[in-house]
Image (spheres, rainbow, N blue to C red):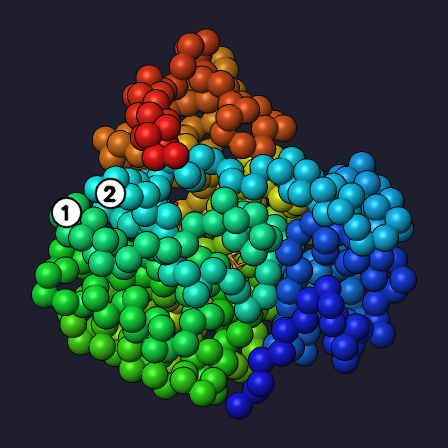
């Protein structure tokens, strides 16, 4: 059994390989690590990072704060207050900068419903069939991604945490009263940081006869990439697998939504063994990742990642555009470029890998896929479609935006052909107005 050891701002100097860090690397960690959450562990540092090529190593960039992850003015501000000592001015500056980093992108709070006068803070219900649940003990991860869009979950921004604080029974009743919900997605953070017995406490109620509406249980996790021992040699790894057996035996589908950002994460013996063990329960593993500058902005990396996933028995599922939050300016790519990376990678692989869909932006309205770039009526345009929509009727109908080579998110696009608005906008406005009304009542 490999004992889990986490490294944070407090103890990263104990990483055996930390002699490879230059004074500039350390300074960047000290400054940026105050604003954005920093945590890595001994699997990542021993097995995934190549310490002799740190300046370009994608996994180092994935976990360790780098100077350019903060805007120069933010970096300077934290640096200045740090020099003055660790006082209230420093905390105020950090708090202010965090608020400027758009901690809750895409209006996720609008997806949190109210049930019998109670706000269910650990539930998001945006698409008719699928409910997201945020078990409270699962609101951390085995390591933190520097690009994370859930970073406020880990940063002591208490009002912005999605997590189940209310009686779980209320959640169960909410689901039963929405009989069209067929999918439960346990998410976080990472639910796989929980012990097998805690995980069981959240999942078992879904297997009861009263919940026969539930067809699919999904667990969103980065544990395969960051701590695959969770499924192999951890003390309760076998109990986790027995829970998976039990879900399958109940007649429901179990899908592990595995988050992988780079082919290296699929290369160790431990991750291969973890995948094999999960698959032996009858669970499927579906994979997803955002496309990120400095990490995976090359078609060959994606093609290789999908091929390895398929080889190991995983199903490529989503490529996302990184959300506008945290260190977005460091990782972002124009959506036109994301589409090129997707298209070129997709062209390289066989049909078996082409279960993947993307690149997709999770915006207020839904999951919007950039299908491609083309011309019509003498105008260059993006062809888009909803993979998921706040209104299911929006899904799978192509629509068009004026081509924009620098846009990095949907809100920077305008409709093609000089139209005033996208077809779904009037309806979306009324959804959001209703959500705002509801919010006013709740606080
Ligand atoms: C992606 C997503 C889902 C799941 O959508 P599928 O298309 O079923 O994978 C559910 N809820 C939210 C908020 C999502 O972003
Ligand atoms: S594993 Fe997911 S939730 Fe955790 S830090 Fe990475 S992106 Fe964020």
Pointer 1 and pointer 2: residues touching (CB < 8 Å)?
A: yes
Q: Write down the quadrant of residue 111 in the picture.
A: top left
Q: Is residue 34 visible?
A: yes
Q: Write down the quadrant of residue 351 in the picture.
A: bottom left
Label 1 beta carbon within 8 A of ligand 1:
no
In the displayed structure image, the side of residue 257 where residue 61 appears, left or right = right
Residue found at x 51% / y 62%: 140
Q: Which residue is mark 2?
A: 115
Percent of width and height locating residue 91: 72, 47
Q: Earlier in the sequence, mark 1 or mark 2?
A: 2
Label count reads: 2
Residue found at x 50% / y 76%: 228
Residue 296 versus residue 152: which sits nearer the camera?
Answer: 152
In the displayed structure image, the side of residue 44 where residue 93 appears, left or right = right
Q: Is residue 353 visible?
A: no
Q: Which residue is mark 1?
A: 177
Residue found at x 62% / y 38%: 99
* Few, some or many residues within 10 Å of mark 1 (<14, 14–19, 20+): few
> Alpha carbon of mark 1 to alpha carbon of mark 2: how far?
10 Å
In the displayed structure image, the side of residue 378 where residue 33 appears, left or right = right
**110 in relation to 52, above or below:** above
Which is more foreground, mark 1 or mark 2? 2
Percent of width and height locating residue 364: 41, 32
């Amino acid at each position: 059994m490999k004992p889990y050891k986490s490294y944070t701002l407090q103890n990263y100097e104990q990483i055996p390989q930390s002699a490879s860090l230059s004074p500039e690397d350390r300074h960047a960690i000290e400054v940026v690590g105050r604003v954005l959450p920093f945590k890595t562990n001994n699997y990542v540092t021993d097995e995934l990072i190549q310490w002799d090529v740190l300046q370009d190593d994608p996994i180092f960039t994935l976990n360790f704060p780098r100077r350019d992850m903060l805007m120069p003015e933010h970096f300077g501000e934290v640096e200045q207050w740090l020099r003055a000592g660790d006082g209230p001015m420093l905390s105020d500056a950090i708090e202010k900068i965090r608020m400027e980093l758009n901690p809750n992108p895409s209006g996720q709070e609008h997806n949190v419903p109210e049930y019998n006068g109670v706000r269910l803070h650990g539930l998001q219900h945006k698409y008719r069939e699928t409910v997201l649940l945020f078990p409270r003990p699962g609101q951390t991860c085995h390591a933190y991604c520097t690009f994370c869009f859930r970073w406020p979950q880990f940063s002591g921004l208490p009002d912005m945490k999605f997590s189940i604080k209310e009686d779980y029974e209320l959640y169960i009743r909410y689901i039963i009263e929405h009989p069209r919900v067929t999918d439960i997605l346990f998410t976080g953070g990472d639910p796989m940081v929980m012990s097998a017995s805690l995980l069981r406490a959240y999942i078992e109620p879904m297997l009861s006869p009263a919940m026969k509406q539930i067809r699919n249980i999904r667990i969103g996790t980065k544990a395969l990439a960051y701590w695959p021992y969770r499924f192999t040699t951890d003390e309760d790894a076998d109990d986790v697998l027995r829970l998976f057996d039990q879900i399958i035996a109940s007649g429901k589908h179990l899908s592990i939504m595995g988050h992988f950002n780079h082919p290296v994460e699929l290369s160790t013996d431990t991750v291969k063994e973890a995948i094999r063990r999960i698959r032996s329960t009858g669970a499927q593993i579906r994979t997803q990742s955002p496309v990120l500058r400095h990490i995976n902005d090359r078609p060959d990396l994606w093609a290789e990642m999908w091929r390895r996933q398929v080889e190991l028995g995983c199903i490529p599922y989503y490529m996302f555009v990184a959300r506008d939050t945290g260190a977005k300016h460091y990782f972002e790519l124009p959506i036109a470029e994301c589409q090129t990376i997707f298209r070129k990678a997709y062209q390289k692989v066989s049909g078996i890998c082409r279960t993947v869909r993307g690149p997709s932006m999770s915006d207020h309205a839904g999951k919007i896929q950039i299908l491609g770039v083309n011309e019509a009526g003498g105008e260059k345009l993006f062809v888009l479609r909803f993979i998921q929509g706040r209104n299911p009727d929006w899904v799978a109908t192509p629509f068009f935006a004026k081509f924009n080579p620098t846009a990095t998110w949907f809100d920077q696009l305008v409709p093609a052909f000089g139209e005033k608005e996208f077809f779904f906008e009037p309806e979306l406005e009324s959804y959001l107005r209703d959500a705002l009304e509801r919010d006013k009542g709740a606080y």
